[in-house]
Image (cartoon, rainbow, N blue to C red):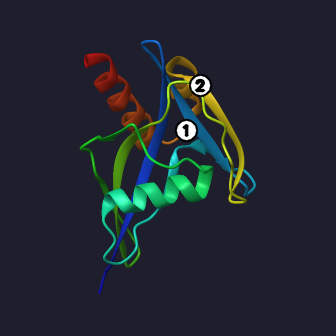
Amino acid sequence: MTDLLHRIKVFVFSMRGRQPEYLLLRQSIPESLWGPVQGSIGFGEKLESAIRREVMDDIGLDRPLDLIDLQMPARWVVGDEEVIEWAFGFRTQNDLPPIALSERWADARWSVFAKAYPTLELDPDRAMIMRLHTLLHAA
């Protein structure tokens, strides 16, 4: 029997004029990669409450000015676990807010798209930030 796990990836961003800046995090484990806020969705928990919980717990930001569903769930099977990952953009205040990193994260940095995109080593993360960036410029 396969266990079904739901996870979220949340790209926190801030608008500086018409230019978004994205928050990238690196975990506290050796050889970790840069990426967005991420975490599990609890049993019976709604996506929006999981997003708010993870963002608050990981970086100390409260409510988004805007929450954008990137509409690109990723799905894969690892052993007896099937993982579904939901991607969102989380707009915060226009000036870069101070971040209160949890112990889980070793480092954080704000980056414009041209620097953020090549920093992401996972193809799904690159596709997610590309979609968010495209949606922000289409608006």
Measured as percent of width and height from the top left, residue 64 is found at: 42, 42
Horizontally, residue 118 falls left or right of residue 30, namely left
Residue under the point 49% across and 39% down:
12
Q: Which residue is mark 1?
A: 121
Measured as percent of width and height from the top left, residue 118 is found at: 55, 26
Horizontally, residue 7 falls left or right of residue 75, namely right
Residue nearest the viewer, comparing 1 with 36: 36
Residue nearest the viewer, comparing 129 with 103: 103
- Outermost residue, top side: 17
Image quarter for residue 130?
A: top left
Secondary element at image label 1: loop
State the quadrant of the N terminus.
Answer: bottom left
Type of residue at label 2? Ser
Residue under the point 50% across and 25% down:
94
Circle nearer the viewer, 1 or 2: 2
Secondary element at image label 2: strand
User: Vertically, is 80 above or below 138?
Assistant: below
Q: Which residue is mark 2?
A: 111
Residue under the point 51% across and 49% down:
62
State the quadrant of the C terminus.
Answer: top left
Image quarter for residue 48?
A: bottom left
